[in-house]
Amino acid sequence: MVKIVEIKDAPGINLVERIANKIWNEYYTPIIGKEQVDYMLTNFQSRDAIYRQIMEDYRYFLSLYDGKYAGYFAIHPDVDKGSMFLSKLYVDKEFRGQGIGRASVAYIEDICRNLGLHTIWLTVNKNNEGSIKAYKKLGFVIVESIVQDIGNGFVMDDYKMEKRI
Protein backbone atom coordinates (compact mmCIF):
# COMPACT_ATOMS: atom_id res chain seq x y z
CA MET A 1 0.00 0.00 0.00
CA VAL A 2 1.29 3.46 -0.96
CA LYS A 3 1.22 6.33 1.51
CA ILE A 4 2.32 9.88 0.67
CA VAL A 5 3.60 12.30 3.30
CA GLU A 6 4.45 15.97 2.76
CA ILE A 7 7.89 17.07 3.97
CA LYS A 8 8.21 20.38 5.79
CA ASP A 9 10.98 19.97 8.38
CA ALA A 10 14.72 19.33 8.59
CA PRO A 11 14.50 15.58 9.36
CA GLY A 12 12.26 15.09 6.31
CA ILE A 13 14.56 17.16 4.10
CA ASN A 14 17.55 15.10 5.28
CA LEU A 15 15.67 11.91 4.44
CA VAL A 16 14.84 13.17 0.93
CA GLU A 17 18.51 14.06 0.40
CA ARG A 18 19.58 10.54 1.45
CA ILE A 19 17.01 8.86 -0.83
CA ALA A 20 18.01 11.17 -3.72
CA ASN A 21 21.68 10.23 -3.36
CA LYS A 22 20.86 6.53 -3.51
CA ILE A 23 18.48 6.75 -6.48
CA TRP A 24 20.54 9.21 -8.52
CA ASN A 25 23.80 7.32 -8.13
CA GLU A 26 22.20 3.99 -9.12
CA TYR A 27 19.95 5.16 -11.90
CA TYR A 28 21.39 8.26 -13.51
CA THR A 29 25.13 7.56 -13.54
CA PRO A 30 24.80 5.28 -16.62
CA ILE A 31 22.64 7.90 -18.38
CA ILE A 32 24.51 11.17 -17.69
CA GLY A 33 27.74 10.12 -15.97
CA LYS A 34 29.05 10.36 -12.40
CA GLU A 35 30.39 13.91 -12.71
CA GLN A 36 27.04 15.36 -13.79
CA VAL A 37 25.17 13.26 -11.19
CA ASP A 38 27.39 14.67 -8.44
CA TYR A 39 26.89 18.21 -9.75
CA MET A 40 23.11 17.82 -9.93
CA LEU A 41 22.87 16.22 -6.49
CA THR A 42 24.80 19.12 -4.97
CA ASN A 43 22.89 21.84 -6.81
CA PHE A 44 19.36 20.43 -7.05
CA GLN A 45 18.95 17.51 -4.61
CA SER A 46 21.00 18.51 -1.56
CA ARG A 47 19.57 19.54 1.80
CA ASP A 48 20.30 23.22 1.05
CA ALA A 49 18.80 23.03 -2.45
CA ILE A 50 15.64 21.33 -1.18
CA TYR A 51 15.26 23.90 1.61
CA ARG A 52 15.67 26.76 -0.91
CA GLN A 53 13.06 25.20 -3.19
CA ILE A 54 10.59 24.83 -0.34
CA MET A 55 11.10 28.53 0.42
CA GLU A 56 10.22 29.17 -3.27
CA ASP A 57 6.84 27.36 -2.88
CA TYR A 58 7.94 23.92 -4.04
CA ARG A 59 6.26 21.11 -2.13
CA TYR A 60 8.12 17.89 -1.36
CA PHE A 61 6.57 14.52 -0.58
CA LEU A 62 7.90 11.14 0.49
CA SER A 63 6.31 8.01 -0.93
CA LEU A 64 6.10 5.02 1.38
CA TYR A 65 5.30 1.46 0.36
CA ASP A 66 4.20 -0.87 3.15
CA GLY A 67 5.73 1.56 5.64
CA LYS A 68 9.14 1.75 3.91
CA TYR A 69 10.51 4.86 2.23
CA ALA A 70 10.24 4.14 -1.48
CA GLY A 71 10.83 7.48 -3.20
CA TYR A 72 9.91 11.13 -3.35
CA PHE A 73 8.45 13.81 -5.58
CA ALA A 74 8.31 17.60 -5.69
CA ILE A 75 5.80 19.93 -7.31
CA HIS A 76 5.53 23.65 -7.98
CA PRO A 77 2.16 25.19 -8.87
CA ASP A 78 1.76 28.08 -11.29
CA VAL A 79 -1.79 29.24 -10.63
CA ASP A 80 -1.51 32.08 -13.18
CA LYS A 81 -0.78 29.57 -15.97
CA GLY A 82 -3.14 26.91 -14.61
CA SER A 83 -0.36 24.33 -14.46
CA MET A 84 1.68 22.24 -12.05
CA PHE A 85 5.37 21.58 -12.59
CA LEU A 86 6.27 18.04 -11.53
CA SER A 87 9.85 18.89 -10.67
CA LYS A 88 10.90 15.50 -9.34
CA LEU A 89 9.46 11.98 -9.23
CA TYR A 90 11.86 9.27 -8.17
CA VAL A 91 11.27 5.71 -6.97
CA ASP A 92 13.92 3.45 -5.45
CA LYS A 93 14.63 0.50 -7.74
CA GLU A 94 13.48 -2.09 -5.19
CA PHE A 95 10.01 -0.52 -5.22
CA ARG A 96 9.53 0.08 -8.96
CA GLY A 97 6.54 -1.62 -10.53
CA GLN A 98 4.49 -1.36 -7.33
CA GLY A 99 2.24 1.52 -8.47
CA ILE A 100 4.12 4.24 -6.59
CA GLY A 101 4.49 6.48 -9.65
CA ARG A 102 0.82 6.02 -10.50
CA ALA A 103 -0.24 6.81 -6.91
CA SER A 104 2.03 9.87 -6.85
CA VAL A 105 0.59 11.25 -10.09
CA ALA A 106 -2.97 10.60 -8.85
CA TYR A 107 -2.11 12.51 -5.66
CA ILE A 108 -0.74 15.41 -7.73
CA GLU A 109 -3.86 15.39 -9.91
CA ASP A 110 -6.00 15.79 -6.77
CA ILE A 111 -3.89 18.77 -5.67
CA CYS A 112 -4.29 20.26 -9.16
CA ARG A 113 -8.07 19.87 -9.06
CA ASN A 114 -8.20 21.52 -5.63
CA LEU A 115 -6.15 24.45 -6.97
CA GLY A 116 -8.09 24.69 -10.26
CA LEU A 117 -5.05 23.69 -12.35
CA HIS A 118 -5.53 21.83 -15.64
CA THR A 119 -2.07 20.65 -16.71
CA ILE A 120 0.85 18.79 -15.13
CA TRP A 121 4.17 19.16 -16.91
CA LEU A 122 7.66 17.77 -16.40
CA THR A 123 11.01 17.38 -18.09
CA VAL A 124 12.70 14.02 -18.62
CA ASN A 125 16.10 13.15 -20.06
CA LYS A 126 15.76 12.04 -23.69
CA ASN A 127 17.82 8.90 -22.95
CA ASN A 128 15.69 7.91 -19.95
CA GLU A 129 13.59 5.46 -21.94
CA GLY A 130 12.12 3.67 -18.93
CA SER A 131 10.74 6.86 -17.39
CA ILE A 132 9.46 8.17 -20.73
CA LYS A 133 7.56 4.91 -21.22
CA ALA A 134 6.16 5.09 -17.66
CA TYR A 135 5.04 8.71 -18.10
CA LYS A 136 3.31 7.84 -21.37
CA LYS A 137 1.44 5.03 -19.59
CA LEU A 138 0.30 7.63 -17.05
CA GLY A 139 -1.13 9.85 -19.81
CA PHE A 140 1.74 12.27 -20.43
CA VAL A 141 2.69 13.25 -23.98
CA ILE A 142 5.89 14.76 -25.34
CA VAL A 143 5.25 18.38 -26.33
CA GLU A 144 8.74 19.68 -27.06
CA SER A 145 12.47 19.12 -26.89
CA ILE A 146 14.49 21.29 -24.48
CA VAL A 147 18.23 21.74 -23.97
CA GLN A 148 19.04 23.74 -20.81
CA ASP A 149 22.46 24.89 -19.65
CA ILE A 150 22.65 24.05 -15.93
CA GLY A 151 26.16 25.40 -15.39
CA ASN A 152 29.65 23.94 -14.99
CA GLY A 153 29.62 22.83 -18.65
CA PHE A 154 26.58 20.56 -18.18
CA VAL A 155 23.27 20.61 -20.04
CA MET A 156 19.98 18.86 -19.54
CA ASP A 157 18.85 17.39 -22.87
CA ASP A 158 15.20 16.73 -22.13
CA TYR A 159 11.71 16.28 -23.41
CA LYS A 160 8.95 18.37 -21.95
CA MET A 161 5.92 16.18 -21.30
CA GLU A 162 2.41 17.27 -20.30
CA LYS A 163 -0.74 15.70 -19.02
CA ARG A 164 -4.12 17.41 -19.17
CA ILE A 165 -6.37 16.88 -16.18
Image: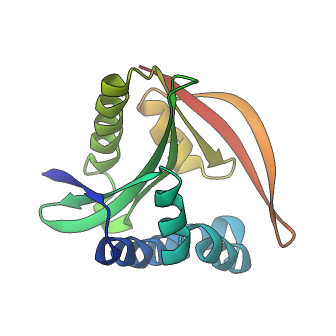
Q: Residue 127 appears at what percent x and percent y? A: 68, 52
Place residue 9 in its image quadrant.
bottom left
Place residue 42 in its image quadrant.
bottom right
Q: Is residue 74 rendered to the left or right of residue 81? A: left
Place residue 38 in its image quadrant.
bottom right
Q: Residue at x 87, y 69 (%)?
A: 153
Q: Residue at x 55, y 42 (%)?
A: 132
Q: Residue 26 appears at what percent x and percent y? A: 50, 74
Q: Is residue 84 above or below residue 119?
A: below
| Circle count | 0
Colour option used: rainbow
In the image, 141 versus 121, the foreground residue is 121
Q: Residue 16 appears at what percent x and percent y? A: 38, 70
Q: Is residue 101 above or below residue 80?
A: below
In the image, 40 versus 113, the foreground residue is 113
Q: Residue 96 appears at what percent x and percent y? A: 34, 57
Q: Is residue 32 above or below residue 141?
A: below
Q: Residue at x 29, y 30 (%)?
A: 110
